[in-house]
Amino acid sequence: MRSLCPIAFAGILIVIFFLMAQPLQSANEFRARVSKKSFAREVTQADVEAEIEFGREVAARILGQYKVVRDKKITTYVNLVGKAVAIHCNRPELDFKFAVLNTSSINAYAAPGGYIFVTAGAVKIMKDEAELAGVLAHEIAHSTERHIVKELGIKGEESSAQAGIAHLLGAMGDPARMAFKQAVDKAMDILFTTGYQQQDEFEADRSGTLLLASTGYDPLALERYIARLSAQPISADMKIINDTHPSYDKRQAAFRALAAEYHLDTVKHPALQERFAAYVN
Amino acid sequence: MALMKIYISLISLFLFPGIAHADVTVYVQSLQAKIMQQPDFSASVIGTAKRGDTLSVTARKGAWYQIQFAEKIGYIAALLVADHPPRNGKRAINADANIGNNARRRASAVATAGATRGLTSDDRKRASQNGVADYSALNFMDKAAVSEIQAEDFLKKGLGE
């Protein structure tokens, strides 16, 4: 009898281990889904500071490309709408700021670190405040997801073979300055010529739409605006946005799938046409 | 008897992880975050969490986390939370705000700021003069920024809250 106890004990342990293995794997998968970024290298305070400093330089270059609209009324309005969306994002360490660019070109831009731009041409074809919020939410998503930062490998500590912008920020001498300038040039290239990775644009559409819904605006507004863009005649004003984004067909298909997944057509959030008209017209 | 106690203790050790694995803690990043009765943007709001609040996540349903909130089951949009407390941002020092206006600055402060900011002040001055960058416009953008409270009030007025 006594010799059977260890055998019985071993048998019980095997059964328990078998039964527990499945839920434990699910728990680990669950933890991985909840904190997916924790399996990547953790973002440090130095990373955030580097991102903001770098973003300011990119923002200054964007403002050199197009003049800023210095009208206080429209600038304040865009900042209020943009910040209303930004206070719902998951990067409270970024002090989001917004500006309207004086160009008929139809587009919007996000420099790293929270600097967001929308062109006067883009605002002109919007119909309501929710559409403005949607476009700004899309750009905010590029910032919160660090799309340019990841593309350029901007890190605060030299923890890999990639050169970090913060490393360059702390370094002195011509080679560091040249490398920094090249990184800014590369960011401008992404914004004005090559575009983001396609998956980053789809992620910005998705996150932007969900952010819109979480803020309280009509979640279909961004899709509506993109649909209107797709109907615009091909012109010089549409060149950059057409060259740097996925096709409208693909974007609209993704929007439809997202709307179906989250029943967004049943969400009765306002579009605020009248307030938009009061500020913009 | 003593051996039996050891066996039971060891068996309990294997059972315990299986019971205790489920909950994960997340931190609210959004200034305010609505807690919904169902994982749906049209559902009723059962409460509001604020930035820094910790929530215990029991499951994930697409873009929603199921949480325990005030002794009820609720749902929060995953976009509004993260697995770390809210971080503080260091505001960038606007050392070159007056380049566009050609204002005079103390040379030592300029040199220090330039040396630790990737580009020197001369780099920025040259870029401004060449029209490649506009630091005066960046200064305008900084000054035009609104606070979170202003934006929240503006939003609430629009939504009729």
Image (cartoon, rainbow, N blue to C red):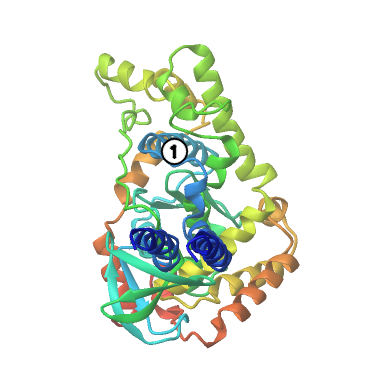
Q: Position of residue A75 (x, y in %)?
A: 38, 57
Point 54% across, 25% down: residue: A163
Q: Position of residue A200 (x, y in %)?
A: 62, 53
In the displayed structure image, the side of residue A59 where residue B96 appears, left or right: left
Quadrant of residue A150 within the rendered picture: top right
Q: Position of residue A133 (x, y in %)?
A: 46, 67
Q: Which residue is situated farthest in the top direction here?
A: A173
The amino acid type, in three-letter code, at marker 1 is: Glu
Which chain does tag 1 point to?
A
- Residue A204 vs residue B66, the one in the foreground: B66
Q: For the C terminus of chain A, give its image quadrant.
A: bottom left
- Residue B125 vs residue A262, the one in the foreground: A262
Q: Secondary structure at mark 1?
A: helix
Point 66% across, 75% down: residue: A257
**Label 1, residues with CA under 10 Å away: few <14, some 14-19, many ≥20:** many
Instruction: Say if residue B35 shows up in the picture.
Output: yes
Instruction: Say if residue B118 shows up in the picture.
Output: no
- Residue B48 vs residue B144, the one in the foreground: B48
Q: Position of residue B21 (x, y in %)?
A: 43, 63
B102 in relation to B150, above or below = above
A207 in relation to B159, above or below = above
Point 31% across, 18% down: residue: B112
Count the marks.
1
In the displayed structure image, the side of residue B102 where residue A61 appears, left or right: right
In the displayed structure image, the side of residue A102 where residue B120 appears, left or right: left
Label 1 sits on residue: A51
